[in-house]
Image (spheres, helix red, strand yellow):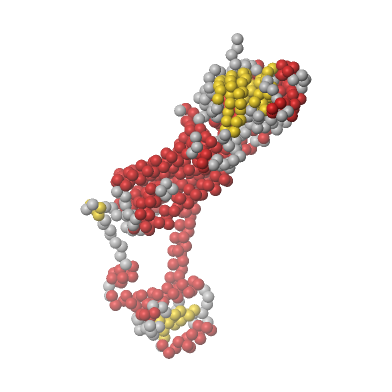
Amino acid sequence: MHKLRHIIRHEYLTIIRQPSFWIAMTAIPVLAAIVITLSVLGNQSSSQHVAQVAKQLHNVAIIDESGLINKNVVKASQLKLAPNDQLNPLLDQVKKGTLEALIVYPQNLKVGRSYQIYLASTDFTKLSGVTTLADNLLKTSLFLPLGSPQIIALAQNGASGDVTMFKNGTPTGGFNDYIAPGLFVVLFYLIFAFSVSYMLTSVSEEKENRSMEMVLTYVKPRSLIIGKLLAVCLVTLTQVLFFALLAIIAYVVLINTGNNISLPLGISLDKISFHFWPIFFGATYLVVGFLMFAGFMTTAAAATTSAKEANNYSSVFFIGAFIPFYFITTIVTDPNSSLVHFLTFFPLTSPVITLIRNTVGSMSLTESWLALGTMTVFMLISIWVAVRAFKLGALEFSQTIKLSKLFKD
Amino acid sequence: MKKPIVSIKDFSLTLGGKEIIKDLSFDVMPGEIFAFLGSNGSGKTSTIRTLLGIYQPTAGELLVNGARLTPDTASIVGYLPEERGLYTRAKVLDTMTYFGELKGMPRDEARQFSLDYLQRVELSDCANLKIKKLSGGQQQKIQLGVAIMGNPKLLILDEPTKSLDPVNRKLLLDIVDERKQQGAAVIYITHLMEEVERLADQLLILKDGRARAYGSVDDVKKQFDSESIEDIFVSIYKEKSSEVSHA
């Protein structure tokens, strides 16, 4: 038992002392934050700039053949409607550059739902400005008869639905119920992206650098594998705590700086609900699924002769983990289909499918237990095969272990 | 009367349907350097791995200190395998301490032993360097340090001087000799016959998994009527297997 402790300590420290570990851990959230911030700021800046350009457009002519444009709306924009028969002279002015733009609302606008814009330059900002102007003139003219500014705003922006969903006659928290179990799906992919590959690297490196034989003199293969698995679990826990800490810091900073966090689908941070069973199954699917994939990776690393070769085999498992996303619509909208049931109990896809179905609440308690039981069996088989591959392949430095040999006595 | 530290009787090993070792028997006494010789593929490494409990014998008995060796009792053994290496991304002192702990040494003791050893082999400055920063010869000295940690009763050294320069080779052989003086038995695997002549008390030449010569260095020389172990080795390997009589 004390040797297991030494192995865990050694493996854990070897991973987390690598600068690359912390660089990768911080780089992803930092890069994501930078990209999102730049994107939001860029969009805001761009929208403001376009609106500004639209306001400054005064050398623009408008021809309304449709009869839908309100003269007062045009006047409010410090522009004037031109007579319909002036199309060609105005077009010539645009060509010469003496007129910035010409907007023509055709007679069949109601049916054709398109209007023409003629622009004196190839400036995309100006094009966006003229398009915004033309769109605003049309929408405002159409909404104006509604009268009340509130009604106009409602017609323009629509309204959000305050959803109440019932389960067995009891109201649920709607999308707020999905957040806590949904976090386990996100966590699974984060862990999958970072930690599972550590198992592969750890075993492959030990073979590649030839330290294996010295270690196996003093440690049983099973102890070594279990020690490595537990160390990777600890590394994973470190990562989860690190990401959770970053999320808490980001949340506190946003709240204290007066930023309102607006989430889609009526989700509210203070209304996120925590129910026992979805969280219990989310956590257990995550742990069991993680151990199952770690077992697959160990087998790939132990049975092959180098990390490069092991990586080739491991890509099969990566594909398995991402397949469910191709069926996400079916999983959510038709959870009782044969395909979804098959993927729920198929080893490579079961962790992600069960985590998604657990999130949207499409599994009965019985099916949840059954899926957990099946996945646990797969996980135990995966670790058994991993230990066996390790026993056979640990000291095989020059040839790959054949699959058939793994199951022979 | 001294008891052998290693006792191998009627040992046979078949791996993947291939017979690797057939009816091998020999003893190694405490304080003795036992040269275990044979060309590549003769079965030396497989014998050592079975002795260490990594492989299971097909037949026979392999005992260390009167019992079958397991990872739990292996702390009496220091092993420097032929396929050797260290954790390249870890630091020298951390790696040595880790192996000391795997051998059952308390952490502080393993650390102190490592520091003393590094000072002796003039690598004190490298204690906190990553192993990948060291030269091949320096890494080999660290590997020997790992093997002798905890003053094991039995040292198994598989080509320990391979690719070492003369200075470091002498340093390593001095350490081996010192361990012998302190009562440790050494199973010494090498292709360098001058090392056998200089160090060995007993020797065994293995060919095709069978012992072809076994005894004290002088006895083997007498038996083959030769003054050179190298000549004996070459003559054994030149003969067809069927013509060689069991020693």
Residue furthest front as drawn = B242
Quadrant for the N terminus of chain A in the image: top left
Vertical order, A189 against B149 (above or below) = below
Q: Is residue A154 left or right of residue B196?
A: left
Residue furthest top as drawn = B1
Q: Pick the residue in front: A312 or B136.
A: A312
Residue furthest left as drawn = A169
Residue drawn where x is 45% and y is 50% of the image: A321
Q: Is residue B10 left or right of residue A370?
A: right
Vertical order, B157 against A242 (above or below) = above
Vertical order, B72 against B86 (above or below) = above
Residue drawn where x is 52% and y is 74% of the image: A123
- In the picture, residue B151 is in which quadrant? top right
Q: Pick the residue in front: B157 or B143.
A: B157
Residue drawn where x is 30% and y is 65% of the image: A159
Q: Position of residue A263 (x, y in %)?
A: 36, 57
Counting every numbered tag in the picture gives 0
Q: Position of residue A175 (x, y in %)?
A: 32, 54
Q: Position of residue A214 (x, y in %)?
A: 58, 30
Q: Position of residue B232 (x, y in %)?
A: 74, 24
Residue drawn where x is 47% and y is 88% of the image: A88
Vertical order, B96 against A345 (above or below) = above
Q: Pick the residue in front: B161 or A299.
A: A299
- In the picture, residue B170 is in which quadrant? top right
Can residue A156 be seen here? Answer: yes
Can residue A60 be seen here? Answer: no
Q: Is residue B55 left or right of residue B197?
A: left
Q: Is residue B179 left or right of residue A51?
A: right
